[in-house]
Structure formats: C-alpha cells, structure tokens
Image: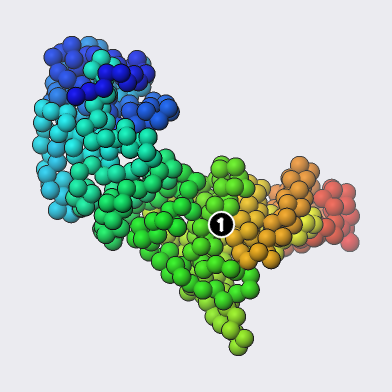
Amino acid sequence: MTDQTCAIDVPAYALRVVDVLEEAGYEAWVVGGFVRDALLGGSGHDVDVTTSAPWQKTARALRAAGVEVHETGTQHGTVTAVVDGLPVETTTYRVEGAYSDMRHPDEVRFVEDVREDLARRDFTVNAIAYHPRRGLLDPYGGREDLLRGVIRAVGEPRRRFEEDALRVLRAVRFACRLGFAIDPATQEALTACAPELGGIASERVGQEMDGILASGRVAWALRHEFDVMSAAIPELAPMRGFDQKSPYHAYDVLEHTARVCAGVEEFTGGMAPRALRWAALLHDVAKPSTWSVDEGGRGHFFGHPEEGARVAGSVMGRLAIDRATVRDAQAIVRLHDLPIHPTVRSIRRMLAKLEEKCPGRGEALAHALIDLKRADAVGKAPDCMGYAVELDAMSRVLRAEIARGSVCTIADLKVGGADVMRERGIEPGPGVGMVLRGLLAAVIGDELPNEREALLDELRY
C-alpha cells in the first residue's frame, strides 16, 4: 500500500526518466537519498531511479526517447541517464546473494517487485520509494524513523552488517549527518560487527570517515560509537581511558579529543576546514606512545606533536585522504603545542613555520592552528580555559599582520638575490641564500622593518 497524500517535488529532469520508462510499459520509482532528504524538508539534485526494466531495455527506451545514456554499472543493472546535462542513475530492481567476503555480493539477481529491491537496502530511511502518481511506498517504516530521528537497519540488523561491514560506518555517518540516534538492536549488531571493518578496503573506510568528520559531529561519534571509530582507525584505540596524570588535563585522552573536536566546530561556526577537523581528531593520537612519568607521578608527553604528525600522515595516507589535506593537517598537529604570544614577532614566527611546512598555506593554516589551540585549551582542565581568551588577542595580531602584508618567506622581503650580490659583492651561490635568510630572521624578529632602504642599508654594512 502506498501513501498518496505525500507529495514530493521531484525535479523535471528525473521525472522525464520515470515517464519514459513507464510509457515503455515498465514500472519506475524515485528512491534513495533524494526521497529521504525531501521527507526531511531538504532538497538535492542527485536523484536515483529504480525500475522493473532490465538495464538493456532501460537504455533502449531512454535512447529511443532522445535521452543520453551511459552504461556505468551494467553488472549491477545500472545505467546513467543524462537529461538537461544532469545525471539520473537508473537501476533494475535487484536482490543480492550471500556476501561471503562481507564486502561484495556473491551474486546479483534481478527481480520484478520493487518491494524486494527495497528489502535489500541498508537502513529504513533509505528504503523508501516515491512515485509522482502512486505516492510513497514505505514498507519498512522509514518515514516514521525519520520523524523519530532513528537509524534502523532493514530487517535483521546483524544480517545487514554481515552483508557489507562498511554499513557499520555508514550507520554512524548517517547518525552524525542527520543528528539521529541509532536503534538499540541496530546498535548491538553494528558494535558486534565493527571488527570486520578490518577487511574493508581502506579507501572506502576513508570515504566514510571523511563523511563523519564533515558532519561536524565527530565528538558524538567518539563518545557514543568509539568501538566503531577505533575499528576504522585502530590508532585511536589507546586513547580510551588513558589517564594523562597532568594538572593541565581533567579528562582522559579520548574525552579531551572529543572536546577539542566539538570546540573547533564551535569556534568556526560549524565551518571548520577539512584539515582542521582531521587535525583535531588526531592531534593527541601519539600521547599514549610518548607518555612518561616523572618522580612526582606527573605525566609528560615529550615529542608527541611531532610523532602525532607522523601518525596522522600514516593514518590519512592509508585512508586515501588527498595529499594536500594530509600536509595541512600534519602541519597543524606538529605545531599545536607551539608557544605563541600576542606579539608581531611571535605571530611572524608561527607563520614562517607553517609556510616552511606548507608553502603558500601559512596564512590559512595560522587561523586553523589558533582555532585548534583555542579548542585544545577549553578541552583541558578548568584553569587552562583562560588561555582561549589570550588566543583571541593573538588572532587580532594575526589578522593585523596579514592585512599589513605578512613576512614569513624570503620571497616576502623587499630585496632579492640581485641586491645581495650587488651590495655584498658576492657571486651567485649558497652565500646569497644565507644572507637572505639572515635578513628574513631579522624582519621576523622585528629587528628590521621590511622596507627596501632599511634592508639595503643592512646589506651595506
């Protein structure tokens, strides 16, 4: 039975695909994330269609109607129709056989009933179909789960996760993205199946982890789904329950990290850059491995920023995160304990260090670094929270320095190699760079202004 009282505004280009297939004598429905998001009051342009037509007949009917077709996944019954330049992925109703490797179905069988197709899907909120005339088809109560704010597996939860272990992470990603809770039976199954993530291709795990971080709710995931998070990134596991034995920290490494992740979202208005989110997650990942205790019983973590940057690079590289994001995140992690003061000299030195690690990215990363340090401060012991206010002053100095034209590389100097050779009477070679580096250090240290005449005078002595 369908609900014909429900009306969803399906884009005309997707309706064109549905109408062509039904005029050719087949059945077709709009399915997937578009329907889910529309029921939540959102909108999107990625519209999927499922149909009773075999993919060959889907392609033939669409082409006969003048629709461009690409055979993008025919082994799974999928072709992509392009209408007005916009793609509509169109797939034959199907069911899937056993998943002996917990990743891929051993066989795909095409069927004629859309309800069978919906039965194979992961979560009820994704197992809803819509037709502009027949209405909403929701055999598993997905619409009610949307209203309740619950992620629930279709059918028997353990079976869903044993079919594809990546669904464990997908459940967490959907819960984070939608701000939903996870149904108790589904939660029990995903926790039990979390270790199977070790058999999933690392780049697929990386895509889901990236989505969890992009939701801005990774703190929730760390607190409520740590078994899953640590199965996806085993390097996180030692954080749980790790007592830092430090007067600066009121929480174990895991809770501190969760607070820092929440803090960067708060301080950036939920618009934290991708690299900053990864840096927040991994900034203290090396604390357990670098921990030591002094004679007074106080914990120390000597070298943890440098080791953390190395581990962050290893984790993100394994998860196939793009190299630029990895470099940025590593630089932020490496410098997150760098002492900074609200002076031009201190800010210039910070910019220079960032520029050295990530050429051309110093200014952008400086803002991210201050946001991480601010979140780090509020995630420590209560006595440390005042440092977050001090960082506001540093942020003001940073903005002023950038507006003035920050000096953090040799290229920023108002003199160049030709000036050095002329004024010092030296030939091209390493000596020129040595002199320029000395001038840069003097300007960064606020001992010389970055003014051409002042720098030339210095060269003449």
5 lies left or right of 311: left
Count residues near mark 1 (Cα–Cα under 10 Å), then give few for <14, some for 14-19, many for 20+: many
- Name above or below for residue 57 compared with residue 263: above
Q: Position of residue 341 (x, y in %)?
A: 76, 60
The amino acid type found where label 1 is placed reads Val
Q: In this view of the protein, can residue 363 be seen by the observer? A: yes
201 lies left or right of 281: left
Q: Is mark 1 on a helix, strand or loop?
A: helix
- Say which of 390 and 210 sits in front: 390
- Say which of 67 and 206 sits in front: 206
Check the picture and name the quadrant holding the N terminus. Answer: top left
Q: Where is residue 75 in the image (x, y as percent from the top left)?
A: 16, 36
- Say which of 199 and 306 sits in front: 199
- Name above or below for residue 235 compared with residue 184: below
Q: Disc 1 marks which residue?
A: 260
Q: Where is residue 388 in the image (x, y as percent from the top left)?
A: 69, 56
Point out the residue furthest to the bottom here: 295
- Say which of 446 and 376 sits in front: 376
Q: Where is residue 152 in the image (x, y as percent from the top left)?
A: 29, 44
Residue at position x 78%, y 45% from top?
400
